[in-house]
Amino acid sequence: MAKGQRRERVGEEELQRGVSRWYERYYSDVGEFRNSLLHNPEVMFQSFAFQKSLINCLRKLDLDPPTAKVLDVGCGTGGSLPQMIELGFDPANFTGIDILEDRIAAARSKHASVRFIAGDARELPCEDGAFDLALESTMFISVTDNDVAKAIATEMVRVTRPSGYIVVIDWRYSKPGKEGYLAVTRKRIRYLFDVGTQTDVYCVARGALVPPIGRMLSKRLPSLYFLVAALLPFLVGQTTTVLRKRLPSQAS
């Protein structure tokens, strides 16, 4: 048992280092204001499109936002929480987990009343079926090890109640010529979340355009952003996919 624990602890430390390096490379490449709504006009309509795709799916769910228990996996600094609150979800029922302690510390400093956990999402410290909704936002695109991604997805399914929902907000294209990204395609989602045996696809909504085009339109031609997304859907890089966990009698 001790040896097994030792191997798992080292694995978590290695994962932490890998995630830290990913963020270091990312912000070194794009700068600290890359995703700042205040400082970068390229972000605004990309953000609107993300929100639109999530809202279009959430309004179809059989959930009561004020009482729904929500888990945010890979929550970072808690960026998903303000939007969820605006949509009627109660922060008292919100739990976030991230493997980087500094990001969790930042989340706690902004949202002191919310339960944030610094830990490995491959072993969530939560009971089976504890949540009505488990979500991730742009996390799996950066998890290129499918064994790690599969373990996280399996845990997300485990802690979601039967007939509850798993929300995957992510990019369906990788970045050409860039390491550290693995597209979250429909095929990959089916594999990670055992679609057809443990879960079913409930809703899919298109969101943000692929970054080079979406960011350019957001800054220079914002009035054309959603027209381009509607007329050229292959340019939409981000989607929101909602899965519904099967009842025990339906799972196979």
Image (cartoon, helix red, strand yellow):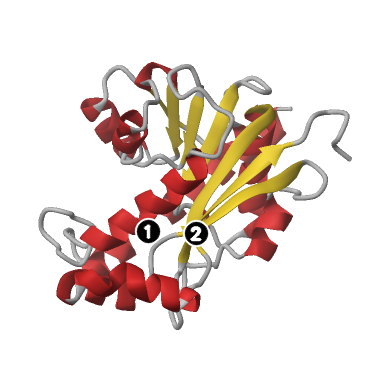
Residue at mark 2: 239
Specify the quadrant of the image occupied by residue 146.
bottom right
**Mark 1: which secondary structure?**
helix
Q: Which mark is residue 173?
A: none
Amino acid type, mark 1 = Arg
Q: Furthest-bottom residue in view?
A: 177
Specify the quadrant of the image occupied by residue 232.
bottom left
Amino acid type, mark 2 = Thr
From the viewer's perspective, is residue 114 above or below residue 205? above
Q: In the displayed structure, does residue 121 sit left or right of residue 84?
A: right
From the viewer's perspective, is residue 118 above or below residue 15? above
Q: Position of residue 82 (x, y in %)?
A: 29, 34
Specify the quadrant of the image occupied by residue 44.
bottom left
* Residue in view at x 64 percent, y 28 percent: 159
Of badges 1 and 2, the one in the foreground is 2
Q: Position of residue 81 (x, y in %)?
A: 34, 34
Residue at mark 1: 21
Q: Is residue 199 at least partly visible in the picture?
A: yes
**Mark 2: which secondary structure?**
strand
Q: In the depicted view, which residue is nearer to us: 107 or 36? A: 36
Which quadrant is home to the C terminus?
top right
